[in-house]
Image (cartoon, grey):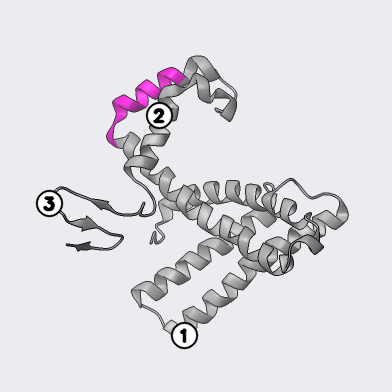
Amino acid sequence: MLCWRPPMNFMFFYVAKIVIAIAHGIPASPAQTERSVRKRRFLEAICAITYQYVSFQREAWRGRQLVHDMITKPIEYVKRNMEAGTAQPSFTHTLLALPQNEFPELDRRIPWVSSTMFNAGADTTYATVLSFVLTMALNPEKQKLAQAQIDPVIGEGRLPALKDREDLPYVNGMLKETMRWLPVVPMGERVIPNHFRVRKIGFSR
């Protein structure tokens, strides 16, 4: 569980807003910021319950309200924009456009699926970005190599895009290595030579 520290807030909001745009098609706006803040408050409630420094019942009630809002508010936003003809392309928009009669209980499933995409995607992406920043801070010589590859390809005035991936093999490899070296979630179990089996939590023989 990543509990909050002020210097990391800006990085979480940066990542969360990207995931919100993908999941719900909400562009940079007060609505996007509101949903990022709501996500942050939910994490704070979980941390408070986990470390038990507040009343469990009070934080559980607060967490329930936050979960309800995180599930329902984005769907309502996308539906309003679809009715007005201004909805941006997104995962939620695609699901809401599916024929209702071909997919049973679609209205009940879409809010949970799309909110899971945001809630899970924001935290895991945020953790991976933190791992990458730590890696670059510990290995400045590798950062210089990556920058030397980026400069002639990207130039000035824009950020790297997916179309640049083939021209940035070293940078692409760094990103893949970050996910391999410091995975956000357990990737199953593996057996090591002394016959110990490494599980999600602890060890067993």
Indicate the secondary structure of the residue bearing disc 1: helix
Residue at mark 2:
173
Query: Which is more N-terminal, label 3 or label 1?
Result: 1
Residue at mark 3:
194
Q: Which image quarter holds the N terminus?
A: bottom left
Q: Decide: is 195 above or below 162.
A: below
**Of all residues shown, which one is farthest toward the top?**
152
Q: Nearer the viewer, residue 186 or 119?
A: 186
Relative to 59, is 187 on the left or the right?
left
Q: Decide: is 33 above or below 141.
A: below
Which portion, as a residue range, is magenta?
138-149
Disc 3 versus disc 2: distance between alpha carbons? 32 Å
Crowding at label 2, few (<14), some or many (≥20) Cα neighbours within 10 Å? Answer: few
- In front of the other: label 3 or label 2? 3
Inspect the image, locate mark 1, and give the three-letter code of the amino acid beneath it.
Answer: Gln
Residue 60 on the magenta segment: no
Location of residue 52 by image quarter: bottom left
Residue drawn at the location 74% of the way across and 62% of the way down: 103
Relative to 134, is 75 on the left or the right?
right
Crowding at label 3, few (<14), some or many (≥20) Cα neighbours within 10 Å? Answer: few
Inspect the image, locate mark 3, and give the three-letter code of the amino acid beneath it.
Answer: Asn
Disc 2 versus disc 1: distance between alpha carbons? 46 Å
Location of residue 55 by image quarter: bottom left
Residue 147 on the magenta segment: yes
Residue drawn at the location 58% of the way across and 55% of the way down: 117
Residue at mark 1:
57
Q: Are marks 2 and 1 in contact (CB under 8 Å)?
A: no
Q: Decide: is 186 above or below 42.
A: above
| Residue 193 appears in the figure | yes
Give the number of callouts: 3
